[in-house]
Image: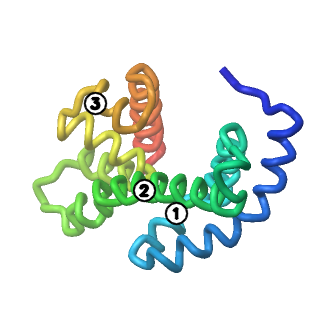
Amino acid sequence: MARRLNQEQQRLAEHGLQFVRPAIAAFAKKNPDLRPALRRVDSQSVAYHAVVMASLTYDPEKSQPQTYFGTAIRHALYREVLTQVKLDKRYKPVEEIIDQKPSACRSRAKKRLMQALRMLSPYERTLLEDRLVEQITLEQLGIEQNCDPRTIKRRLRLVIEKLRRAESQLP
């Protein structure tokens, strides 16, 4: 259920937007080891969302706006970047998964399937690997990705359909 901001909260959120860029810059400066993952995260969107959520709970008697909104932005960025780092650790480049020098005994169908796998995104390959190779349950994948297991099942079905289409289009 979406919660609407009242006029005071909207004003606070608009005022809090001025802290987005400095907070992102401070986060990147303070965490140089997380910069590669930060580049793959939409930090602006994460920060804007954090500002809106912080405007719901901000109490001017307890803290200054810059402190409160800056902290909320940094915490949101940290959570998002850690999620990205977790996904990066699980991602294996195509070169590690697919044998670059296929043996002569490998059938034509297997070669086509390997070529079709290269056409999938890293997220799609990781999802397939987790479910089919690692045999992680839909419930566990749903918890990891913060969504319903039925959503994971639908995503897997779409990835498999995409893989079949890619394989059928190959020469």
Indicate which disc, 2 or 3, sits on the residue closer to the N terminus.
2
Q: Give the spatial CA distance, label 2 vs label 1.
A: 8 Å
Do the CB atoms of the residues marked 2 and 1 lie less than 8 Å apart? yes
Foreground residue among 106 and 154: 154
- Residue type marked 3: Gln
In terms of image quadrants, where is residue 16? bottom right
Q: Percent x, y for residue 116?
A: 38, 49
Q: Earlier in the sequence, mark 1 or mark 3?
A: 1
Residue highlighted by disc 1: 40
- Calculate the distance from the C-alpha at mark 2 to the C-alpha at mark 3: 17 Å
Q: Residue furthest front?
A: 61
For disc 2, the marked residue is 84
In the rendered image, residue 165, in percent from the top left (x then y), is placed at: 47, 37
Dot 2 amino acid type? Gln
Q: Is 54 located above or below residue 31 in the figure?
A: above
Amino acid type at circle 1 is Arg
- In which quadrant is the N terminus drawn? top right
Q: CA distance from mark 1 to mark 3?
A: 24 Å
| Contact between labelled residues 3 and 2, with CB atoms less than 8 Å apart | no
